[in-house]
Amino acid sequence: LKGIFTLNRHHACVSNGLCYEKVCQEGSGEMVLEMFFSGFPRMVGLSLFPRLSSLTIVGQSISSIQGLEYCPLLKELWVVECKLNEISGLHNCVHLQKLFLYDNNIQQITNLEMLVNLHVLWLNKNEISEIQGLNSLVNLKELNLADNAVETLGHCLDSNINLHNLNLSGNKISSFKELTHLARLPRLRHLSLKDPQSIPNPLCLLYNYYIHVLYHMPHLQRLDTYDISSKHLKDTAESTVLKKMMYYTMRVRYAQRQFDELKAKLRQQRKDQIQLPEERIRVLTYMLRNVNIYKPEDLTSDFGNNHSHEQRLQHKLDALKDRLKFWERRLEEVEACHQQNVALASDRRDMMVCFLLLELETVGNIRFEEGNTSEPWFTSCYDLLLSRFCAWDYKPHNISGIKISRIIRIHNRALRQRFQDKVNSLLCRQEPSPFSQNYKRCMEYLFYVPDPEHSCESDEILPILENGFKTADAYKVQNPSKPDMLCPSSLPDSCECKQQQKLWYMFDNEMVLPEYLVDFEYITQVYVSHASPADAPSVSRAELDLDEEALNMEPILKPHPKLLSLDEKSTLTLARANVLSQITVLNLHGNSLNKIPEISRLTALKQLTLSFNEFTHLDDISHMPNLEYLDVSFNHISSLEGLRGLGQLIELDLRWNQLTQIRDDMNVLRKHVPALLRLDTRHNPWHRNECVRMVVLGRLKSLTYLDDVFVMEEEAAAAVQVAARSRINQASLMTHSRTDSERPRSLSLLSSAHLLTQISPSPWKHSQELESGWTTKITALNLDGLRLTRLSNLERLVNLRWASFDNNELTRIEGLEHCTLLEELSLNNNSISRLEGLCAMHRLTRLSINSNHLQCLDGNVLDQLPNLHFLSVENNIISSLHGLQRSRSLFELYVGNNDISTTRDIYHLKALSSLIILDLYGNPLVKKLENYRIYMVFHLPSLKALDGVAVETCESETAKDVFEGRLNADMVAEKLGHTNYRDLSELNLQSSSVRMVDLAPADLFSNLRSINLDHNNLTSFSGLVFLPNIKVRMILVVKATFINKLYVPHTVLLP
């Protein structure tokens, strides 16, 4: 062995021009050393070359790097085409700038932390499956990891901000999401994922590969050895992506619209179902309170035995209370059923939105196709699922069958390619046989259902649809214990289902391809509250009979006359008092009172009951210093505004009224009822009912009971904290702001403010001292869902570009006057009624004010927004599109679910020549206008999509055939600029390309006397027949194809 080493060293010396006998003297000055294919088994003798700066070892039998501690000046190292198993022995080479370790057996990137001066690193043709250990290499400019086994990138290269050249060809990267991580490398110019010397990564075979890379990394100069520096290429990629984002924005809105329609149906269903319980509760409660305040003279018959009378009375009270409990439970069941149905619909909507976003993120390489009965694959999948269901398995759970709601076909190009490659590789290993020729017949369809007890269904399904199933080892780690079977099969051996059911154990996840997603429900023999969505159980006639029985039980009370007003005499009679100052308790239940101004004279009053009256406000119940109890339930009160001076009131019952504005009403109580201990607000149509309790407790800190539920200290403290966060302060700005200078290149439909606050950390820490002017660095702000009532403390955010204030309680747009650089602004789900406070935002490109109280679109404001490309004002109460003609830069306009009802409004949009997406769905005009869709397509020819559906070429052609050259009221209005048709006496439409006349209804043009149609293309003027006083002048420049037979009782001038 010693002889071999001696021979190798001698050969090395000769190859490098050194004398073997004098190497000890001459080696100390040598700076470059090379060894090629000499069978060197170990790195020895390097102590003789202390000034070595470049070492090249090629084609040796070296398994580890050794001896470099003697070469501290080394700057370039090549150990290639050897047999290295690991990276080691480099800890002293701190000056190393170039490291080449390609074509070895390295499995992990390790021991490079000290090489902070490294510029070039080649690790291609190894066995590396994970990129790691490069965080400290901040000066790295070139990295070659080609021909390894890397599948994911993640954040492993985020620290290598100086990386200029990256080669990842010949790996196993299959997801476009992995490529987006490379967009964070600001100096990356050359990227290779399928260079000619390596096999391409799987993602390189996907659709739109180049578009995806060019869009996310526009700074690249070369891709896969091709020059892509052309600005035209990158502009094309960006234009393509923007069109796709517009398309998927439209699709997501369409999914949301379907959800809104279903939710509206469910609300109507709930309204119908609660009508009877509410009516019964009202009747029973009315009787119960009457019985509670009965007087002996109110009875219809005389009961001699007081004890028997008390028993009957108590029995009736108990019966009424029992019936009330039944109907209250029934009301709770209806509400629970409604919430369950809404939650299920919401889950389905969220799932569909996730599918659409996944399609967008993968640039169409994953698609989801919802099937119907006309599709052959739908029928086969439907039949397959039904054939595998066995009622015997589910008999213990009273499940008799399944109902398939929908089937979605999954098109995942990457997973299918992986599956096909795997099958082909297996077939290549086998001898030719009938199996290899007809292998598809041997494939099996399996069923996979997520375990609801261990994970959220969507959280488990979505990764499977995108990336396939995890490896067997991953599932073993996730579920170390054996799961229990929910429905162990106990069917007889003779059951035919036995032959259909199989249990498969798959240890190679590449052999399983997700192909269909089936949404189904169990059909139960009995109603189960947690089963699939259904109507709440119906009420039998027997229940109504029980109500009548309780109401008609003895003792029967005489109906008393209802008071329409309250005077001093009736007050004294009701209270059984001699003077008003003696009255401390007054019960005015069950009258028809709507105001009681005299009540303020009862200065000693402590308890006042006004239930079952006609009150709409409580202005009269003010400045009553001794009042402690007030019951105004079962009235029509819509606001507490006017309530004043009730400093001693400790209990207030507001149930079953028409209160909607929880924050405003609680502010009234906080100011004028400071001692309140018990409050009941149930059964009011509150806006945002889900946050009522938190808002009340945040305002009324003295409460001990709310809605008949004890207020815990923790709950009260949490509510106070939430209320404190409802104001914009330094803490909220630090938490919810970002300082990024550009929107990340991401295939996301999120607004810039949402996207930045989601993917970027806050630049400030609450523990650190803030520098002066820190607010001027803020570019993005997301203050969604903080229950803000006004925008304040924003005057120093002079560089703010993207802002979102969704899901708050704002009533006006204010406080943004100094934010003149704003480009995107979102104010969805507030209570804004006017477009104002926007005039200084000349750079604004996107504005969203959905679900507010807008009634009109102020043209003067829109005129100040010359760069506005996107406007969304859905779910408001806008009745006219007047003003939009000022917004000439609009590309996208969403005005769905408003109150647009006239065709005249469409003419306000004709000036918008760039408008390509319009959504008017849910407006009265859509149902009212005949041929609505082609009407819109004709008048707005630039449209590419209308109401969530792409405009087809055939629709444009049909629109021209139907409406081109049609003289109707809309055309007249467009020509004249007004709709005062009855003021018209003459009409001149020479050379207007009129093809046919349709001036209807005739009474609109009753004063029209003369119409000039010279030089038109008339083929029919039958529309003139019903105009009584008209004279027509026509010169037919094109021969008429037909002229209807007319009876015209007046002169028609035809030259």
Image: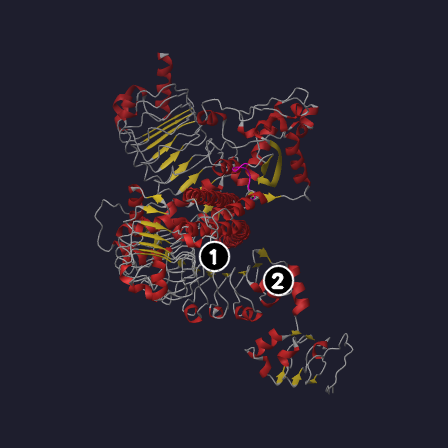
For this orientation, the residue located farthest to the right is 1045
Residue 369, relative to residue 128: is it above or below?
Answer: below
Which of the image's four quarters has the C terminus? bottom right
Earlier sequence position, callout 1 versus callout 2: 1
| Label 1: which secondary element | loop
User: Where is residue 941 shown, x and y percent of the image?
Assistant: 59, 65
What range of the chain is rendered magenta?
528-535
Q: Is residue 881 left or right of residue 971?
A: left
Residue density around tag 2, few if under 14, some if 14–19, many if 20 or more, within 10 Å? some
| Secondary structure under the numbered disc 2 in the rendered image | helix
The type of residue carrying mark 1 is Pro
Picture coordinates of residue 101, whole percent (x, y)? 39, 29
Quadrant location of the N terminus? Answer: top left
Residue located beneath label 2 in the image: 933
Magenta region, mostly helix, strand or loop? loop
Determine whether 116 is above or below 89 in the image.
below
User: Percent position (x, y) of residue 625?
Assistant: 25, 59
Q: Is residue 957 left or right of residue 14?
A: right
Q: Which mark is residue 821?
A: none
Amino acid bearing label 2 = Arg
Look at the image and say whether residue 576 sits in the magenta stretch: no
Asked which quadrant contains residue 54, the reply is top left
Q: Which mark is residue 559?
A: 1
Q: Say whether residue 534 is magenta.
A: yes
